[in-house]
């Protein structure tokens, strides 16, 4: 598919300008299942959850065509000072609760759609409100795992030596102040998955123990 200029890049994907109002996200390594990802996005969007529209007919397993959103990411807004860290954490909590109110696509009544990578760089702040992007890790399961993943991601930054550590700690505190569904099993599985994630640096993996301690202190 012919694309326009490069709009952004992440750990695994590049996003290109497409025709008016649409973008194409392409995996650089040629892997993934963008069709399945897009189907989940359509499912949650049909239940009122804020995600970009997708064009599955124009997508492939490694390329997803989706609606172009306007606005900064939550992380960019926090760094620019236009959004407070506490508000950001509370917004993340609200997005998790809203997502887990969406019925699963399977017949299992105790399972829900999970995002499994919901953090401030995967939330775009548009004029219509926050939208959740990057559903490449999505699966169905118990909500405690989703809460655990988001908490561990924030805690890893909070216990590190980056300038945004204090911001991440404030977000984490606000996230866990919500009557969340964080569970011991969910937290343990979240830590295991983060440790096994091939995109994690050695330093990020080393921080997992301290990150879990911080979460348990706050929760």
Image (cartoon, rainbow, N blue to C red):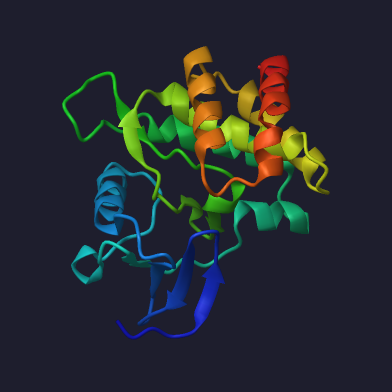
Vertical side of 129 occupied by 160: above or below: above
Vertical side of 37 occupied by 65: above or below: below
Q: How many marks?
A: 0
Q: Position of residue 213 (x, y in %)?
A: 71, 19
Q: Position of residue 33 (x, y in %)?
A: 29, 55
Q: Position of residue 64 (x, y in %)?
A: 33, 65
Pick the front one: 210 or 80: 210
Quadrant of image for the C terminus = top right
* Residue for point 38% across, 80% down: 18
Residue 86 is at least partly visible in this image? no
Pick the front one: 81 or 191: 191
Q: Which of the 4 image quadrants contains residue 26?
A: bottom left
Quadrant of image for the N terminus = bottom left
**Horizontally, is 61 left or right of 123 in the view?**
left
Vertical side of 200 occupied by 176: above or below: above
**Horizontally, is 71 left or right of 114 in the view?**
right
Vertical side of 39 occupied by 15: above or below: below
* Residue for point 76% across, 59% down: 80
Residue 158 is at least partly visible in this image? yes
Pick the front one: 182 or 157: 157
* Residue for point 78% across, 47% down: 164
Q: Position of residue 54 (x, y in %)?
A: 30, 62
């Amino acid at each position: 598919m012919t694309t326009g200029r490069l709009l952004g890049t992440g750990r695994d994907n590049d996003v290109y300008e497409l025709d008016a109002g649409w973008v194409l996200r392409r995996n650089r390594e040629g892997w993934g299942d963008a069709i399945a990802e897009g189907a989940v996005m359509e499912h949650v969007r049909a239940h009122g959850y804020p995600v970009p529209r997708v064009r599955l007919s124009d997508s492939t397993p490694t390329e997803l065509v989706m609606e172009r959103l306007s606005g900064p990411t939550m992380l960019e807004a926090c760094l620019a000072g236009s959004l407070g860290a506490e508000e950001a954490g509370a917004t993340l909590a609200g997005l998790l609760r809203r997502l887990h109110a969406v019925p699963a696509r399977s017949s299992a009544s105790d399972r829900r759609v999970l995002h499994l990578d919901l953090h401030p760089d995967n939330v775009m702040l548009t004029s219509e409100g926050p939208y959740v992007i990057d559903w490449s890790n999505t699966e169905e399961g118990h909500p405690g795992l989703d809460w655990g993943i988001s908490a561990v991601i924030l805690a890893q930054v909070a216990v590190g030596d980056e300038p945004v550590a204090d911001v991440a700690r404030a977000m984490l505190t606000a996230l866990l102040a919500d009557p969340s569904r964080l569970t011991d099993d969910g937290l343990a599985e979240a830590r295991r998955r983060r440790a096994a994630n091939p995109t994690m640096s050695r330093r990020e993996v080393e921080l997992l123990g301290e990150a879990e301690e911080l979460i348990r202190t706050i929760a």
